[in-house]
Image: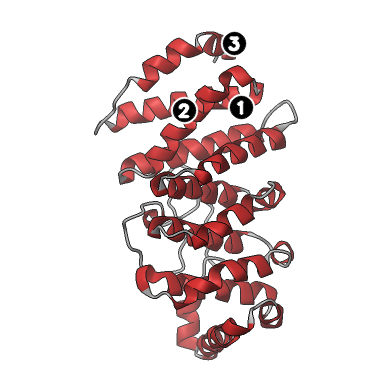
Amino acid sequence: EHHEYSLAQLDEIMMLLHGIKPDSNNAVLEGQLVCYKYLLVHMIKVNEESTSKKAFLILNELILALKSKKESRRLAYDVLLAISTSLRSSELNNGDSDLQRLFTMVMGYLSSPSPHIVSGAIAALSLLIYTDADFCVEVPNLIPSVLVLLQNKAIEVIKASLGFVKVLVTSLQSEKLLGLQADIMTGILPMSSVTKHHFKGKVILIVEILIRKCGFDAIDLVTPEKYKEFVRSVEEGRKGNNNNPADGAQSEAKDPEHHAPKRGKWAESNAESGQEEALTGKKEFFIKGAGK
């Protein structure tokens, strides 16, 4: 409740919070993460160099929680979402710059040598763009920074990056995608020949969404020659589903655009690096209590 007190006692509060090891106690973990949420929002808003290191320590804890067991991951997503909402609704009319500062901080983890941390940061960015896809386009270098990670050798990083792209193309309006489609296609198409870990299936789904939103001609125009046959086969398969009423009904049920719930439904598996997921076209994460 008292920002000035929290910041004045920051060292002591951080030491107390950082010393807590919740283990399997979810109530303790939830209390710890909520405290981190309030502190991080205060730090980002005051934007002082003296608190910068502590802000990254908190963000590091959240990213690690995103890569932990299911319940911890859910709590971390809820807290990250609450942080984003608090920064966006800033009374100082600088909510955009505060939110952009959060994006920039998370992006700093994309250069980590640890694939575990990198994939956690990508999962965090996926959640943030899902809540405000239009804003992500305004964040400098955000999309190119993730697309380049599709060339990474770590499976969990590639998996998280494809999940990010899927959320991006699902959430953005067609007119916003037109300026990004060339970079997106160049980034994802090399994965179209990799059948392991469902990478090819993920690419097909992304291409289908792009074709539906931007039109086949626009997508074909930015497709490198060596992948044109693959993209045509995706379009033919999409048309085949549309011509079959039964298949079309199933396709519509799976289509993330047709079923965009009021509360975001995301498959937990995309945030968990080692877990395989079946391609169902659902959102990549589940945010419990997002309406609070």
Q: In this view, does 237 lie above or below 73?
A: below
Q: Residue 57 carries which label?
A: 2
Give the secondary structure at mark 1.
Answer: helix
Marks 2, 1: nearer the viewer: 2
The location of residue 235, given as percent across then percent down, is: 57, 85
Does residue 221 appear in the picture of this structure? yes
Give the side of residue 60 with respect to residue 103, left or right.
left
Q: In the rendered image, which residue does mark 1 sit on?
A: 44
Give the secondary structure at mark 2.
Answer: helix
Q: Return the residue nearer the eye: 213 or 159.
A: 159
**Which label's residue is closer to the chain start, 3 or 2?**
3
The location of residue 94, given as percent across then percent down, is: 73, 31
Q: Residue 4 carries which label?
A: 3
**Which label's residue is closer to the chain start, 1 or 3?**
3
| Residue at 61% over, 27% down | 44
Give the side of residue 13 with respect to residue 129, left or right.
left
